Amino acid sequence: MPKIPTEFHSFETDEEFKTCCDCGCELLDSAQMYMVQKSFSKDECLMEFALCQNCKEKLDEQISGQSKEAIYDFLFDHAEMVEPPEDYSYDDAMEQIEECLTCGKEREKCDGYTYSGLFVGTHLVPGPMPMMICDNCQETMAENMSDHTKGVKDKFYSENFPGPPSEVDLPTSKPVFF
Ligand SMILES: [Zn+2]
Ligand SMILES: [Zn+2]
């Protein structure tokens, strides 16, 4: 059994995410794909969650086509989507979150950043994810989003993440990947 890289463990429990943040379904023993996303300001983890495919699809359905296109256009215009090599390893995969997908800025030089990965059980799913986006690029993407999409995202975040710890400043833009 492969192990989930520690970068994708829950900061809160120091272990793998075990359930979907939205519906609470089991993730590790399931064949269902899920996404783990974490946002940081410097070294401080501001937000983290695991979201199952069902819940992700429900959210995607609510996002307007226009915003989706804006996001994907942005990603494809700025990102190199690489095919995973045959001897694809977790180490290769984790290299992908060392630089911003769209501007190439190194993670350690970023003030804020968000990274995401897709998993099935404890298997990392190869592909464009895992990916990391710096806060500057996130802001650019947010500008291309419709108010409707922003509303969907805000609702999701406020329902699942009530009230940030008072001592941290929330990033000006919410992470873009559900
Ligand atoms: Zn779910
Ligand atoms: Zn960037």
Image: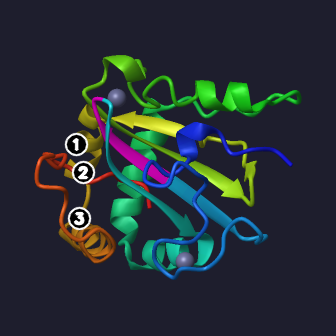
As drawn, 29 above or below 49: below
Q: Nearer the viewer, residue 163 or 114?
A: 163
Q: Say whether marks 2 and 3 touch (CB < 8 Å).
A: no
Q: Amino acid at mark 1?
A: Glu
Q: Say whether marks 1 and 3 touch (CB < 8 Å).
A: no
Q: Say whether marks 2 and 1 touch (CB < 8 Å).
A: yes
Question: Overall secondary structure of the magenta stretch?
Answer: strand
Q: Earlier in the sequence, mark 1 or mark 3?
A: 1
Q: Nearer the viewer, mark 1 or mark 3?
A: 1
- Image quarter of residue 103: top left
Q: Quadrant holding ligand 2?
A: top left
Which residue is located at x 70 percent, y 25 percent?
Answer: 92
> What secondary structure is found at the residue carrying circle 3?
loop
Residue position for label 3: 146
> What secondary structure is found at the residue carrying circle 1?
helix
Q: Amino acid at mark 3?
A: Ser
For the C terminus, the quadrant is bottom left
As drawn, 122 above or below 178: above
Which residue is located at x 76 percent, y 72 percent?
Answer: 30
Residue position for label 1: 139
Which region is colored magenta?
37-42
Q: Position of residue 28 (x, y in %)?
A: 72, 65
Structural distance between the alpha carbons of marks 1 and 3: 13 Å
From the viewer's perspective, is 87 left or right of 31?
A: right
Structural distance between the alpha carbons of marks 2 and 1: 5 Å
Q: Nearer the viewer, residue 126 or 11?
A: 11
Structural distance between the alpha carbons of marks 2 and 3: 8 Å
Q: Amino acid at mark 2?
A: Ala
Residue position for label 2: 142
